[in-house]
């Protein structure tokens, strides 16, 4: 009995600490343990609420069917469900996730694939999850490599995908809902996911300040001279998948690593290609065009930084690059 009493007091203390003193050092120490527990509880409550809404809506629908108003009832169900799930979700602030004071971030987006199919989705991210991914990337030890771009970045990409694959559950569920709603086949689903990333505006990410990066010349100088947005002083010059879906800002390798993580989760045989200046997704799927071979399989290039690119198409300015496979999906990813 004494154990239960003190356990109950400890729980109440943690709940009050989270509610009124979340930014204190004490709570930050226990947050890695308590936050996943709270998140699991919140998701369970949301699920119960959704089921309740669906049950009530179903009963209402049966009544409306008797009155020949089934279509109106169906629309009401969709509105109620959306409000129940997203009523507490806020738009992102302009700071990095570890500095964010908000609890949820949502991106409500619509886009088209190459077949002009239109898709819509609400992508919900917890800043604390993006913060954990950011912290992991910043503290990741320098990889021991042979000095080549493919070996160095291949090892960085692998660590980021491993760290983020379980942090992306909410994103996987959103893509899965879109697939089921639109009855997409294997190829169409991949096209939907890639076209989503292609629709997001390009933002350059680099490990130096904008001023120093401009001095690298070439593309970097032109990009900054045009006054375009960049993410400066980001270790490795890329952000992890959870960071990317949090702020929707990324360049070629940030996007490729995100897509690699998502598509690998859904069982696709994917790769990441690198050259001295660019990074692209690779996919082992029936297609035409340019590809690299690995263990007898063809991995087709897939550009992620601009709309309209199909598998096997490389932009003219990258045609003469020397390309390497930096990462191929292993069986345990």
Image: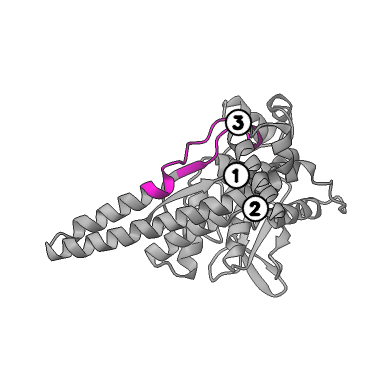
- Under circle 1, the secondary element is helix
Q: Position of residue 314 (x, y in %)?
A: 58, 54
Measured Cα–Cα span from mark 3 to mark 2: 22 Å
Does 232 sit above or below residue 250?
Answer: above
Q: Which residues are magenta?
A: 83-107
- Can you say which quadrant of the picture contains the C terminus? bottom right
The foreground one among 211 and 22 is 22
The image's mark for residue 95 is 3
**Horizontally, is 79 left or right of 265 in the view?**
left
Q: Is residue 98 magenta?
A: yes
Residue of label 2:
257
Mark 2: which secondary structure?
helix
- Mark with earlier residue (3, 1): 3
Asked if residue 145 can be seen in this view, the reply is yes
Q: Secondary structure at mark 3?
A: loop
Q: In front here: 290 or 180?
A: 180
Number of numbered markers: 3
**Contact? badges 2 and 1 (CB < 8 Å):** yes
Of all residues, the one furthest to the left in this rendering is 67
Is disc 3 in contact with disc 2, using a CB cutoff of under 8 Å?
A: no
């Amino acid at each position: 009995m004494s154990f239960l009493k003190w356990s109950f007091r400890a729980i109440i203390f943690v709940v009050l600490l989270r509610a009124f003193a979340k930014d204190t050092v004490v709570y930050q120490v226990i947050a890695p343990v308590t936050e996943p527990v709270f998140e699991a509880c919140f998701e369970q409550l949301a699920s119960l609420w959704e089921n309740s809404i669906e049950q009530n809506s179903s009963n209402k629908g049966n009544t409306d069917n008797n009155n020949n108003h089934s279509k109106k009832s169906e629309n009401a169900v969709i509105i109620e469900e959306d409000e129940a799930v997203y009523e507490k979700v806020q738009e992102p602030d302009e700071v990095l996730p570890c500095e964010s004071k908000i609890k949820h971030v949502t991106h409500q987006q619509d886009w088209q694939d190459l077949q002009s199919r239109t898709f819509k989705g609400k992508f919900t991210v917890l800043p604390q999850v993006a913060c954990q991914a950011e912290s992991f990337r910043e503290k990741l030890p320098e990889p021991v490599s042979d000095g080549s771009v493919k070996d160095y970045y291949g090892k960085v990409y692998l660590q980021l995908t491993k760290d983020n694959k379980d942090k992306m559950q909410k994103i996987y569920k959103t893509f899965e809902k879109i697939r089921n709603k639109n009855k997409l086949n294997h190829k169409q689903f991949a096209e939907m996911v890639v076209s989503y990333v292609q629709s997001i505006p390009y933002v350059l990410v680099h490990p130096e300040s904008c001023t120093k990066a401009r001095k690298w010349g070439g593309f970097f100088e032109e990009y900054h001279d045009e006054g375009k947005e960049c993410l400066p002083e980001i270790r490795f010059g890329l952000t992890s998948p959870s960071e990317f879906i949090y702020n929707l800002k990324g360049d070629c390798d940030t996007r490729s690593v995100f897509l690699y993580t998502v598509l690998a989760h859904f069982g696709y045989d994917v790769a990441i290609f690198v050259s001295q200046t660019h990074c692209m997704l690779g996919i082992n799927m029936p297609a035409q065009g340019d590809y690299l071979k690995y263990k007898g399989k063809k991995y087709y290039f897939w550009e992620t930084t601009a709309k309209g690119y199909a598998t096997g198409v490389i932009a003219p300015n990258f045609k003469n690059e020397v390309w390497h496979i930096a990462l191929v999906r292993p069986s345990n990813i």
